[in-house]
Amino acid sequence: MASTSIFLLSGLGFAAASILAVASKVLHVKEDPRIAEVEACLPGANCGGCGYPGCSAAAAAVVAGEASPELCVAGGMETATAVARVMGMSVAFKEPKVAAGICTGGKRARELYDYNGVEDCRAMAMLYGGDKICGMACLGKGSCVKACSFGAIEMSEEGLPVVNRSLCVACGQCVEACPTGAIRVNGLSSELLHMNQLDDCLAPCMQKCPAQLDVRTMIQQIKKNEMGEALLTLKKRIALPGIVGRICPHGCETICRRQIVDEGIAINSLERHVADWEMESGGRVPVSCNPANGHRVAVVGGGAAGLSCAFYLRRLGYEVHVFDKQQTLGGMVRHAIPDYRVPQSVSEWEVQGILDLGVIAEPGTVFGQDITLESLRNDGFEVTFVATGAWKTPALGIPGEESAQCVNGIEFLTTLKKNQPDLEGKRLVIVGDTNAAMDVARSAGRLHAASVVVLTKHIKRKMSANNLEIDRAAELGTSLLFKTTPTAIEAGADGLTVRYVSTEYKDPKKATGEPKPVEGTEASIQCDLVVNCADRVADLAPFTSEDGECEMKLTKKGTLDANKETLQTAVPDVFIGGELYRGRGPIVQAVSDGRVAARSIHMLITTGKVEAPENAQLRVIPETILKGMKVEYSVPRVQIPEIPVEERRSTFHEEVSKALDRASAEREASRCLRCGLTCYDASAGAQYAGQPGVKSLLEEQED
């Protein structure tokens, strides 16, 4: 009986084995051996960053042609190259990426309620979006830390994620785990070309800055003496920090929250401090650039906008040629602005730093004569960015201005950069209210002119020139005749007679509307030289046909027209920026235009279309403008060192404003409140408590 059972079971087993053997042959699916080879190239993290459930599925997708060899975000370029080798393919450069937190709030952020529940950000977010008053704040429960398979993220004492860049593989799992978007993954191109968005953590100063500089991060790096990192932060947004740090009108400082308790941070001086640190160090901080991508872009105009565009495009891997009519690049800064504002050595350093990256200079090339848009296309340039500036000074439109003793301001200033005319004992009348007018006035004072008078149709606060430049001209003896405009220039035995009348606004009380001449207010002034510093305009001759018509669309101001968010013209492969597009304006706006154009050009070449930034922050966000704050200490703003007025009269090349030393820069950086959208450091500057001028505000707030 037992033997029968054994034989029966053995028979059944043999039969089943035979059936399975046959089935394995009949139903066998041959697996491509490359799947195993591809999987061996992958890191084996099974992180899911590629969108497939594990490395095995990812390998199968690559072999099946459903995914490219570059699918593994964790492996980077090395893994992509290995996978491509197995597949007999090649891969293009894969830009390295890394995760980074965007929230600066942490434990200091104001809370809506006390949370007692699961220690998970996603769980907390289910209750009113989280406990923070800011909807995009880090909730601090570490969901990103738990999601990271590579141990690249830790939570700081402030309750914010800190990413170890050497361990981060940019798999994106932390981004998926964060319910508020407080952590993101970026590469070089996205870091350089990102435009402010409404869902970014933006301090008021960052919102106000035309270049969208990350002021908060730069200042904290200065405070920690991380000067190299501070410079790289600067250059993500400002290609010419040493120049911009000297002559930017610094509107960011006017919106600084520090003003609620004392004075705004000296942001511009801190920016200059960083730029000068590099220049004085004897070397350059390495700036990362992507490998050459085989695309060529032409930049016409070697001023601030053109150099900025070239800088960012080169960092993205483009071959960039900068064409300029001058023999040296640098635009108005290098060829017209006096050395006592921006020394020649600074502009040369800034320009050379961009050329050292591989940007190719084509000096002595006149647009419209030596090159045209069509010739650039024929030479293999896929896109052209034109930023030729505004070098023309329009005529005053009054009798007698054709006199040889009547010159325009730009010619006057460019001549000064080469040699200094003899103005000793001469009487000057300057017409205009621009910074150029103040430069002429300040220069004439240094050249010992007998008198310098500026005629402006505006009151002081309505003048185009910066208040600081107006004051410095006055310090050297310049007289300003406000609300006046010239009507004629007459030559005589005693030089020139400038006849002028008073002007008045349409609404005198509010000083609004274009000032108009007032009848019966005629007067005159004697002089030896008249300098016309009317608003500069762009030379549109390269865009003008033989019949005198501009071949490109114009704005109401008479400048070339373009999409205001992308700077693309009606001609798809032509972009414009700077003063050619906007008219006379601050250098920081020109630098910003260069970066905006670089973004648009990169988008056109890589995707075939140009789109405006989504959810762009175009205006100051109202809820970030606080009416009051509970700050613990009032710390006096740093005093920028300057050479005495009398010394200025005897020097043409020494800067009036000096750089901050290390101690002053660190103290000024300590005043920064490290603002977010709504949060701030109430104890900023506490380390200076008890020092002269530092005042505790705690008692006042308690009262």
Image (cartoon, rainbow, N blue to C red):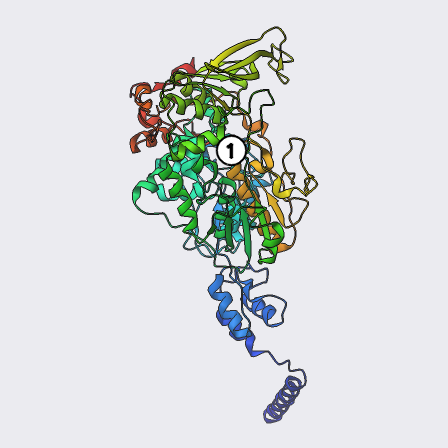
Q: Position of residue 199 (x, y in %)?
A: 58, 39
Which quadrant, please, contains the C terminus?
Answer: top left
Q: Position of residue 566 (x, y in %)?
A: 62, 43
Badge 1: residue crowd in 10 Å (few <14, some 14–19, many ≥20): some
Q: In the displayed orientation, state which residue is furthest to the front.
A: 493
Q: In the displayed orientation, state which residue is furthest to the top.
A: 520
Q: Secondary structure at mark 1?
A: loop
Q: Position of residue 191 (x, y in %)?
A: 50, 47
Taking the spot 55% from the left edge, 53% from the top edge, the residue there is: 297
Relative to 442, does residue 313 appear above or below in the rendering?
below
Q: Nearer the viewer, residue 579 or 665?
A: 579
Residue 280 lies in what quarter of the image?
Answer: top left
Count of numbered marks: 1
The answer to whether any part of residue 139 appears in the image is: no
Q: Position of residue 277 (x, y in %)?
A: 33, 39
The answer to whether any part of residue 318 appears in the image is: yes
Which quadrant, please, contains the N terminus?
Answer: bottom right
Q: In the rendered view, does 269 fall on the left or right side of 389? A: left
Q: Amino acid at mark 1?
A: Cys
Relative to 408, does residue 39 appear above or below in the rendering?
below
Taking the spot 40% from the left edge, 18% from the top edge, the residue there is: 426
Q: Nearer the viewer, residue 608 or 442?
A: 442
Q: In the rendered view, does 390 fall on the left or right side of 674? A: right
Q: Nearer the viewer, residue 64 or 384?
A: 384
Taking the spot 64% from the left edge, 86% from the top edge, the residue there is: 25
Q: Nearer the viewer, residue 378 or 602?
A: 378
What residue is disc 1 on? 209
Residue 389 lies in what quarter of the image?
Answer: top right
